[in-house]
Amino acid sequence: MSSQTTEKIQHVLVVGGGAAGWLTACHLAKKLKPGTAGGVKVTLLESPDIPIIGVGESTVPAIRRSLSYLGISETDLVRHCEATFKQSIKFVDWLHNPVAGQSSYYHHLFDYPDAFNFDLTPYWLAGTQAQSYADALTIQGKVCDAGLGPKQITHAEFDGLTNYAYHLDATQFAALLAKHGTEKLGVSRLLANVTDVQLSPCGDIAAVSTDSCGAICADLYVDCTGSSSLLLGKALNVPFISRQDVLFADHALAFQLPYESEQSPIPSFTIATAKEAGWIWDIGLSTRRGTGYVYSSSHTSHEQAEQTFRDYLGPAVAGKDVRRIAMQVGYRQCAWKQNCVAIGLSQGFVEPLEATGLLVFDATARMLADQFPASVGAIAGVAKRFNQKVQYSWDKVIDFIKLHYFLSKRDDSPFWLDNRDPAYAPDSLVEQLAFWQQQLPSHYDFPSRFEIFNLDNYQYVMYGMNFQPEASAMSHQLTDPNQAQLYFNRVQQQQQHALAMLPTHRALIEKIKQFGLQKV
């Protein structure tokens, strides 16, 4: 064995900033301890001229664990990133054709059911279902609909009565991560534009050439250059695999909307409203709303899409421009090749439903840090396992996103009819749903920690969209109806308690800005 293969990695270069780049740099620096004896240098190179896309404003609860782990204050997040709390995604008009004046909806909540170690799901399925799945099994749907926050000001940072994530300003979030990474974790920051990527004879990246910092050499390179994928895609020629055969939406329109007044309620959930060729997101930050229309250009024109979006927003957008963003839906054939690993849009992207972008970027950045190669010679083995896990995660995410469309009963446009067609759905999803028709889903159907979305996530969507298993699938589980009724009653009591004690979402945000939260 050559000494080169046992040589310790001394320097990691993250190319590209934004939320993905800075999350990656922070995770690496937290683990690799740059500036200490035996530590690994972590440098982030970002362009002073390329703005970040800045519309990824929605997260999932896993981000709380990451922020707490990295040592970032929740109070700072609220004060400096326009952050608010997100307890759910409210899906409006996804199930049935919309009727003027009466929308249908369901919640995909962040509180998981079955807090009693007793599975209420088969009893709900076998009952009259007078209440929605979310309202029968949890308190959180009622908390959301009442406009309340997930915690009180007396709760510590990252703690709450219900589970939650955040809505936040993506540009300000990247700036907070950059400040924390450089000041607290030892990340070195360089500002320059990449002009070339130099390869060594063996096919590794040898250096990244820049316009103002010269050539920068490292042992491992992390490509966070966005959809341009300068390192993995262009320099190392890793092809992009499109998944628009399954997920049709390929464009988004975006607009930042002020509140009507300083006291306008702030929903503590993302509102996702289905339209004829896609869906509109509506996210309440502390001083504005972030909105956008994700749509398929194969099922509508750009002009019609913009009109649909403007109709939703109303007169506030009259005479103002909206941003149009083209989306590459899919992923690179591999996320790690040679001594280069891609994280963020350079690795892959599916439409932002369920906040999959930051979720996958954060999860893969943490995995890279935790599985960091012990030596140069270990890179190939770590890369092989990393690629298998990332590929598995992306495929599972695509299954879950498609589920929302596939279960719809809408037939009012070609977009929805195509989405319901099994020919345009992954075989893995079609087979899974056929199995769950006869056998209720369980934790055993989600054996990998890289599933990204698990049993509870599927249950909220499936039962929110009226997926009805055969009666025989649940009959053998209905062994204690009296106990089940006691637990259903307890959920209702807990709902009333929560409604009485929790503050409105806006009041909670304003108190945190004024007084701060208690440190953990």
Image (tube, grey):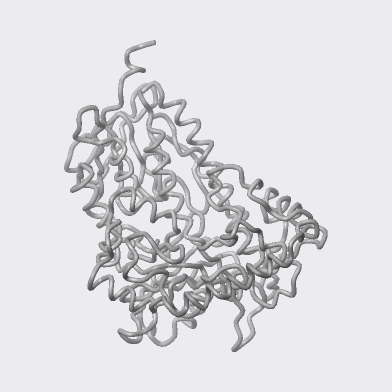
Give how far across and how far down residue 261 sits, in percent: 32, 86
Q: Where is residue 364 in the image (x, y as percent from the top left)?
A: 43, 44
Q: Which quarter of the figure has residue 380?
A: top left
Q: How many marks?
A: 0
Q: Point out residue 29 in the picture as x, y percentages from the top left corner.
A: 28, 40
In front of the other: 57 or 216: 57
Rendered position, 14 above or below 520 = above
Q: Nearer the viewer, residue 465 or 196?
A: 465
Q: Going 44% across and 58% down the picture, which residue do you hit?
A: 61
Residue furthest top as drawn: 1
Viewer-proximal residue, 64 or 515? 515
Q: Does 101 sit above or below residue 282? A: below
Please determine whether, in this image, residue 121 is positioned above or below residue 6: below
In terms of image quadrants, where is residue 38?
Answer: top left
Residue in view at x 69 percent, y 54 percent: 441
- Horizontal side of residue 446 vs 78, given as left or right: right
Which residue is outermost to the right?
Answer: 472
Q: Residue at image x 50%, y 44%? A: 240
Quadrant of the snapshot with the N terminus = top left
Could you tell me which quadrant the C terminus lies in?
A: bottom left
Give residue 294's position: percent from left, percent from top: 50, 67
